[in-house]
Amino acid sequence: MYNENLVNLIRDGFHECIKEGVSFQPSYYPHIPKKQEENALKRFIETEEEETVLMLFDTSLFGKGKNGMALTDRAVYFKDMFGPTHICAYRDWRIEADDAAKVLCISKENAFFLPPFLTALLDKICTLKKYEGLFDAEEQEAAEKKAAEEAAKKDAEERAKDEEKKASEDEEDDDDDSDDDDDVGFLDLLGVVMDVTSDPSRE
């Protein structure tokens, strides 16, 4: 969910989270290089549908997107050179209680980030989202998506039941036709027997 205040907050605050002397530079929405973003999305940013990357700090050589940090409209993503991606959704972040170093597993030896400043930025992001009602909007969006998925699932189940019922009815019709054929065969045989027993020439 795009929000101008959120974008401005990240743009104004993230540079404080980077250690002095680091040559890599963050890029911000809507000026994130497309290829760089695509690489990061493939390698360490595991975004959900309709989630927007607002800041990308790619710390891999040649912008390969193998590691770094990203701030989206819903979460923060971090991947060091070694190890998996660590994710924290803003709705799970506890304002003035969580520590970015612990939540995102940023080691003291990390060459790029200053966890205390990142902690302060995440506090500000989550405070903004809380007081601007962005969490409520996301919950509404998630609820609508879930309702649509459940409706589609229910519709598919009902169609499957209808098809199964129709197939069962067709099978019963085939059985009834088979029984009719047996009845006709029996009546034909009965008719032959009666003809034979009533033939005057046989008396």
Image (cartoon, helix red, strand yellow):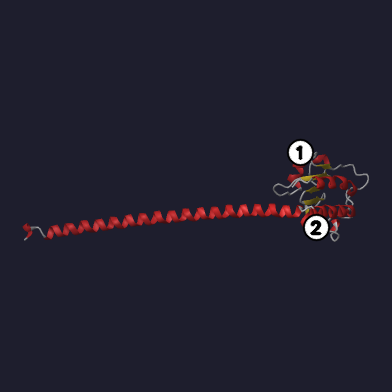
Residue 184: name its quadrant.
Answer: bottom left
Residue 176 location in percent, x, y?
33, 57
Left/right placement of residue 180 relative to residue 79 reads left
* 104 or 138: nearer the viewer: 138
Residue 89 visible here: no
* 185 or 3: nearer the viewer: 3
Residue 132 visible here: yes
Total label count?
2
| Local SS, label 2 | loop
Residue 58 location in percent, x, y?
82, 44
Left/right placement of residue 127 relative to residue 151 reads right
Residue type beneath disc 1: Lys
- Name the residue at 82% across, 47% down: 5
10 Å neighbourhood of mark 2: few (<14), some, or many (≥20)? many
For label 1, the residue is 34
Vertical side of 3 occupied by 102: above or below: below
10 Å neighbourhood of mark 1: few (<14), some, or many (≥20)? few
Find the distance from the CA under tag 2 to the CA under tag 1.
29 Å
Residue 7 location in percent, x, y?
81, 45
* 4 or 163: nearer the viewer: 4
- Name the residue at 61% across, 53% down: 149
Residue type beneath disc 2: Trp
